Image: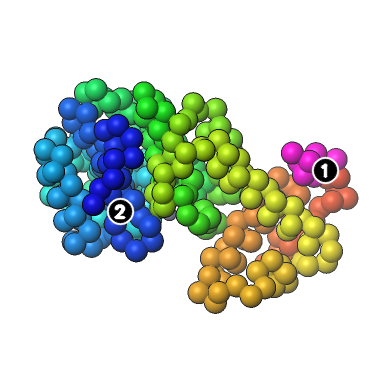
Amino acid sequence: MGIHVAPRVLGIPVGDLDNVVYLVAGDRAVFIDAGYDVQADVDSLVRQWGDAGRPQVEAIVVTHRHPDHAGGARLLADATGGVVTAAAAEKPHIEEAFPGAVVGRTIEDRELMDLGGVMLEFVHTPGHTMGSVCVYYREERVLFTGDTVLGTGTTTINPEQGSVGAYVESLRMLLDFDLRLICPGHGAVIDEPQAKIREAIDRRLSRERDIVRLLSNGHHTSEQLFAALYAGIDPSLREVARRQIRSHLVKLESEGRVTIRGEEAKLETEAFPSQSASREAR
Ligand SMILES: [Zn+2]
């Protein structure tokens, strides 16, 4: 049930979160992401590879450490002989979370991989996690984004694993790419890449403005911010929502705009009036 989303690119849905694994094939092939550590899902990836003529698998590129992307890497490597490949920052996390998984190759920012007729470029895009990567297929102007840009839902950032500041920087950097399509790790292909990237940047900055405004209105604790920003949220999403607030506060603190003490955050508006005004205006 793979879908040809671009020349030489097959999108293969797996799992239950609109996960998409991509098989990109020149003379040799790569998988981009591996889905969950679920044998039936990996079997379906291997079947699609079989239907494509079993090209030599050069790499199983894991865009980042999360289980819906990295979980199936070990099984997929065993079945296809591909080398699990990720950013160095992600390697220890992948190997720790998935026993038996070995990241056999780490990739530098802007490193190229020649598949014979298809040239891929790896682009480091820290933010969602610090070792998140995108893959650029320049000839077709296609960017594979993992969870950095999504077709469905909103990218979340756990402050233990990523950074809102780095995320926004990475998105701004991606605006410089000549893009026709984004192939996200979840959801359908995106055919207005620039608008989608801008939307993701704007969403982060607007959330940041909300938090700054609430802080200036006396909402100083995480719980006060949570109650104001996420009233009525699905209980299963509360922890994720709290982490988003935390990630934003950490960014503001790193910029000298906020001081965090335990559960309380305080604006540094008097110390940094001009700076916060200019940043908010962007
Ligand atoms: Zn993720």
Q: What is the quadrant of residue 182 in the picture?
A: top left
Residue 163 on image: x %, y %:
56, 49
**Local crowd at mark 2 within 10 Å, few (<14), some, or many (≥20)?**
many
Relative to residue 260, is residue 146 depicted above or below?
above
Residue 29 among those drawn in magenta: no
Kindly identify the residue that appears in the image at 74 percent across and 57 percent down: 210
Q: Which residue is mark 2?
A: 13
The kind of residue tagged 2 is Pro
Mark 1: which secondary structure?
helix
Q: Nearer the viewer, residue 228 or 221?
A: 228
Relative horizontal placement of residue 259, taking residue 42 as reference (left or right): right
Q: Which residue is mark 1?
A: 277
Residue 23 on image: x %, y %:
26, 41
Residue 80 on image: x %, y %:
14, 45
Residues rendered magenta in the picture = 274-282
Asked whether residue 131 is in view, the answer is: no
Relative to residue 185, is residue 266 depicted above or below?
below
Relative to residue 135, is residue 66 depicted above or below?
below
Q: Nearer the viewer, residue 231 or 72?
A: 231
* Magenta span dominant secondary structure: helix
Disc with the residue nearer the chain's start (1 vs 2): 2
